[in-house]
Amino acid sequence: MNGTVASALLPVVLLIAAGFLAGRCGWVKSASVKDLSNLIFLLLAPALLFRAMSKVDVAQLHFKPVAAYFVASFLLFGLTMAWRGFNREAAVLGLSNTYSNSVMIGIPLIGLAYGPPGMVVLLTLISLHSVILLTSATVVLELAAAHEQARAGTHARRPMAATVLRALRNAIIHPVPIPIIAGLLFAQTGWTLPDWIDKPVQLLGQAFAPVALVMVGITLAYTSIGAHWRGAALQSLVKNLLHPLLVAGIGWVLGVRGLPLTVMVVAASLPMGANVFLFSQRYQTAESLVTASVGVSNVLALVTVTVTMALAAHL
């Protein structure tokens, strides 16, 4: 196994394993999982997203390689929805097929493998990754939830325009898009946060990745993987192999070549990000399957990312 890949992925696997141990030993009870999920989703994630976006200079970003990534992602998301139907579960699984762990794994991996030129390409993707994929997924999830409620008769049927506007409002007034938009707007002012504010925000953001991955392990300890291993394996293969294959094909059609295409393909091959797990928790859908899939995707990535990097070198 490539040493660069191992150095980026093994810490992720170990953090999930640490959470699994904590759950198995009863150090964190199953009743506490929801509270921990809220802590991550409502406090740690917004701090990370705001601080990351508050340093983005839009003028320095290069968008053509990133366009290939998002075209492939939306195509795969749409295919998932078409296959499974318009519902919350399909939306969450569509997100799991397309949302990479581009920060915790992507940054060290791309930095070590491709140096500063590769990092410029990756950071362009990271600056848009969450705001596009998570906001889009939130809109779809809110629409799907409204659709399910209407079919179940729990809410009066609304006109489509009203449903869309309500979904957009819920998607914007949400702990993911708000810090992204606020951070991006703040970055364009040229201001900087005073140290006494920036430091605690930084520390909260740094806590997100390890705590979220430990949380995956804790939930995994209370999940019967045996009942979900086939589904988790399928989701992981789609994310780790089909997603980068689509990015490579669409990037080639769009005329993207060399290092930019290589970085985008490798980014697409990264395992599922912890935000997928948090979305499944928040919308209370496919929680066991997504939890198992995040764990399997990260373990499988030790092999699939190595293979993808070897093949992507010839693009």
Image (tube, helix red, strand yellow):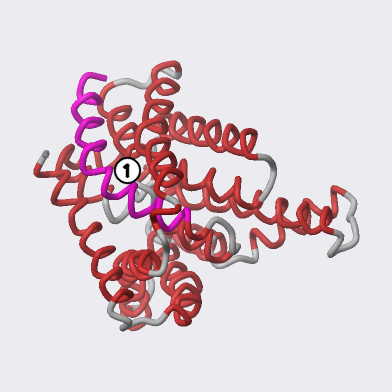
Residue 301: in magenta span? yes
Is residue 229 positioned above or below 306 on the image? below
Is residue 205 positioned above or below 72 on the image? below
Task: Measuring from the top left, give residue 53's x and y in whole percent.
Answer: 43, 58
Write down the region rendered in magenta: 289-315
On screen, residue 55 versus residue 262, left or right, reads right
The residue shown at (11%, 39%) is: 2
The residue shown at (27%, 43%) is: 301
Question: Quick one: quadrant of the C terminus?
Answer: top left
The residue shown at (90%, 61%) is: 156
Report the number of discs: 1
Task: Measuring from the top left, give residue 63's x and y in whole percent.
Answer: 43, 34
Extreme-front residue of the structure: 226
- Magenta stretch: dominant secondary structure: helix
Mark 1 lies on residue: 270
Task: Please state which amino acid type lies under the numbered disc 1.
Answer: Leu
Closer to the camera in the image, 70 or 152:
152
Is there any visible trace of residue 188 in the rendered image?
no
Question: Quick one: quadrant of the N terminus?
Answer: top left
On screen, residue 179 versus residue 303, left or right, reads right
Task: Measuring from the top left, give residue 258's x and y in whole percent.
Answer: 26, 22
Is residue 312 positioned above or below 137 on the image? above
Is residue 153 positioned above or below 198 on the image? above
Residue 277: in magenta span? no
Q: Residues within 10 Å of mark 1 (few under 14, many from 20)?
A: many
The residue shown at (40%, 48%) is: 229
Tell me the element at label 1: loop
Task: Measuring from the top left, give residue 223's x and y in whole percent.
Answer: 42, 64
Extreme-left residue of the structure: 3
